[in-house]
Image (cartoon, rainbow, N blue to C red):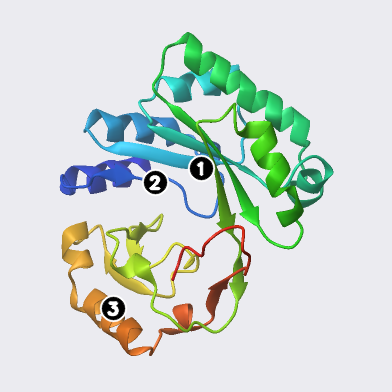
Amino acid sequence: MDFSLFKEIVDKNRGVEFVLPFQWGEPLLHRDFLKMVKYATSKGIRVMFTTNGTMLNDDICRKIAESGAERITISFDGIGETHMKIRGFDYYKLREKVLNLKKIRDEVKSKLKIDISMVVFKETENDVGRLYEEWGSVADRVQLIPRFVSGKRTVRCRELWRGIIVVLCDGRVSICCADYEGEAIVGDARKQTLAEIWNSKKMRECRRAHIKGKFPPICENCNEYETDLVSKRFS
């Protein structure tokens, strides 16, 4: 998303409480990402984002700490060799980057919270205990997220009622963060306010469909990895 479009959407939607400026990609690759964060926070909007952490050098760490962002979440997929196999980046190098971010945050007296997050599925669930052991006393929060899997949906998705909608890079608005191809567009943030889209006929129709169990194509086979370690998010 161009910074100009981001600014336009922020300015037009003064009631927005928080922004999660990432969607199926590494946000720190965007040349204007931290500019976007600072602009949103300057308007009193809470900003939280997720990163794979590979770009956390000293300069970027300091800029993040001073950006006004409320929370940063670093994604891990397992510990040690498991993370390396899945992510293709050395787990211990990433650990050092996160520890350095924490050191810089504390040096500049930033209020930034640092979270560690792991997607749970067959290859990673045996590392859950170690994740908490290694990060429980370091991070501000450790969280687990079940992996998306294909499987018949049987219950309605709570996201349609929670107050969160996804604005794609061109301003089109989708009902879901899993809709990275833009198959379930319900509005356009260039032409409408987010409140108008949230309360629109298309959104109401989608909610009614979920209540009746007649799920849209993007939803009908959306499911999550079954495990006793973490609750599903989208049910």
Q: Is residue 150 left or right of residue 111?
A: right
Lower position in the chain sequence, tag 1 or tag 2:
2
Q: At numbered mark 2, what does the secondary structure look like: helix, strand or loop?
A: loop
Q: Along the polypeptide, which appears first: circle 1 or circle 3?
A: 1
Q: Nearer the viewer, residue 201 or 1?
A: 201
**In this figure, which residue is indicated by the disc labeled 3?**
207
Question: Label 1, on which residue?
Answer: 50
Marks 1,2: beta carbons within 8 A = yes
- The answer to whether the residues at label 1 and label 3 have Cβ atoms under 8 Å apart is no
Work out how far the residue at label 1 is from the one at label 3, CA to CA, in angstroms: 28 Å
197 lies left or right of 124: left
Q: Which residue is mark 2?
A: 20
The span from disc 1 to disc 2 (Cα, nearest Å) is 8 Å
Task: Tell me where residue 230 appears, x and y as whole percent.
Answer: 56, 58
Q: Who is closer to the viewer here, 120 or 227?
A: 227
Q: Position of residue 138 (x, y in %)?
A: 59, 26
Where residue 148 sits, quadrant-wise, is bottom right
Give the residue displayed 30% in from the left and 47% down from the top. Answer: 5
Q: Amino acid at mark 1?
A: Thr
For disc 1, the neighbor class at 10 Å (few under 14, some 14 to 19, many from 20) is many
Question: Where 185 falls versus 56 (above or below)?
Answer: below
Q: Name the spot of residue 87 as percent of width and height, x first.
A: 73, 47
Residue 57 seen: no
The amino acid type, in three-letter code, at marker 2 is Leu
Q: Earlier in the sequence, mark 3 or mark 2?
A: 2
